[in-house]
Image (spheres, rainbow, N blue to C red):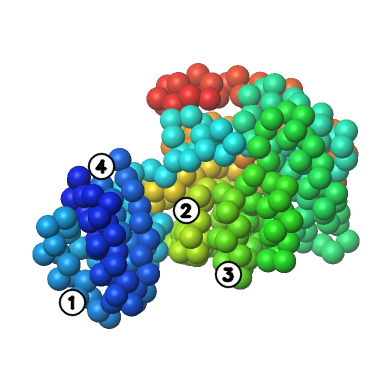
Amino acid sequence: MIIVLKPGATEADIEEVSRRVRDFGFKTHLSRGEVRTIIGIIGDDRAKEQLLALQSLACVESVVRILQPFKLASREAHPDNTQFTVNGVPIGGKQIVVMAGPCSVESREQLMEVATKAKAAGASILRGGAFKPRTSPYAFQGLEEEGLRLLAEARKATGLPVVTEVMEPDKVDVVAEHADILQIGARNVQNFSLLKRVAECGKPVLLKRGMSTSIQEWLLSAEYILAGGNPRVILCERGIRTFETATRFTLDLNAVPVVKKLSHLPIVVDPSHGTGSWEYVAAMARAGLAAGADGLLIEVHGKPEEALSDGQQSLKPDKFRHLMEELRPLAQVLGRSL
Ligand code: PEP
Ligand code: MN
């Protein structure tokens, strides 16, 4: 349930209502919108009658039962879009965010080249994997801590904030020490102990959709992070498994308007993993923005043919620059900026 306060409710009103809710044995979660403050009630709704009675308080506009299983992630609980900045880069507002970089951090030279060129082309966040979830145990597993150090160096050199994947609860602290956004990969979207741990890390989280995760399950995973006290979640649609084999995954662009309807969280589209082929990345990047995504995640590599992971879906820096030039007027037509 949520309690919607009347516009103009004071700090004392908020504290008074929150205290009453806590006295019934619930936890509260405050969401301050442009005009309204909403108090989310966390816990099972057995004391529903008592909560409904709070409707008679002068500062309360309504007490509403949220029908969706995800509560804090739902748009009912938080009608305005969630917006925040990461080292000054705005996420979830009018400005489109482009996260670009190699699938894996492979060396200082490789990362610096891509970071510098991605920035020059207009990317605002640098991506790069240091801990890699690979299907085969014989495949390159990432440079691990050394990769994190290189990402931090690249941030220093370019000023771009860094997003990188964390795969295990025990590594959250070290990744959070070096990165600005922690990525939860498709394969870990329902690793609930990892979700609980990143909720506590104090850094924004890029939560990828699992390849077999429904939108509801994905939003429930986001709910773990929000309920754990971390409101800065960015969703990432990266393709799902279907019967189609012509592309690596099927990029589910339906998810963009569906998520926008159900949730207030920002959503970005990853056309690189979504298609698995560099040739289709530009088309699906354009489509992602047209569908209403708040940003894109794109793999870029100086020498894709030598990449240690995902070379076949990585754009060369020149192609990435060209794509960014194409996306700028598109963003404008969509009433956004890039
Ligand atoms: C990645 O971003 O390189 C990655 C492994 O993504 P996903 O979890 O979507 O497969
Ligand atoms: Mn990849």
Q: Amino acid at mark 3?
A: Phe
**Is residue 196 rendered to the left or right of residue 64?**
right
The answer to whether residue 243 is above or below residue 34 is: below
Q: Where is residue 116, by image quadrant? A: top right
Categorize mark 3 by other alpha carbons within 10 Å: few (<14), some (14-19), many (20+).
Answer: some
Cα–Cα span, label 2 and label 4: 19 Å
Q: Quick one: SS at disc 2?
A: loop
Tell whether circle 3 marks a residue whose Cβ is less than 8 angstroms from ligand 1: no
Cα–Cα span, label 3 and label 1: 32 Å
Q: Amino acid at mark 4?
A: Val
Cα–Cα span, label 2 and label 1: 28 Å
**Is residue 188 rendered to the left or right of residue 226?**
right
- Check disc 1 and report the residue beneath it: 49
Residue toward you, 334 or 37: 37
Q: Residue at x 59, y 50 (%)?
A: 203
Q: Label 4 near label 2: C-beta < 8 Å? A: no
Q: Quick one: SS at disc 4?
A: loop
Categorize mark 1 by other alpha carbons within 10 Å: few (<14), some (14-19), many (20+).
Answer: few
Q: Which numbered disc flags the more N-terminal residue, 4 or 1?
A: 4
Q: Residue at x 32, y 66 (%)?
A: 41
Q: Which mark is residue 231?
A: 2
- Check disc 3 and report the residue beneath it: 192
The answer to whether residue 87 is above or below residue 79 is: above
The answer to whether residue 37 is above or below residue 65 is: above
Residue 57 image point, x, y percent: 13, 62
Residue 266 image point, x, y percent: 47, 44
Residue toward you, 219 or 249: 219
- Check disc 4 and report the residue beneath it: 35
Q: Amino acid at mark 2?
A: Pro
Total marks in image: 4
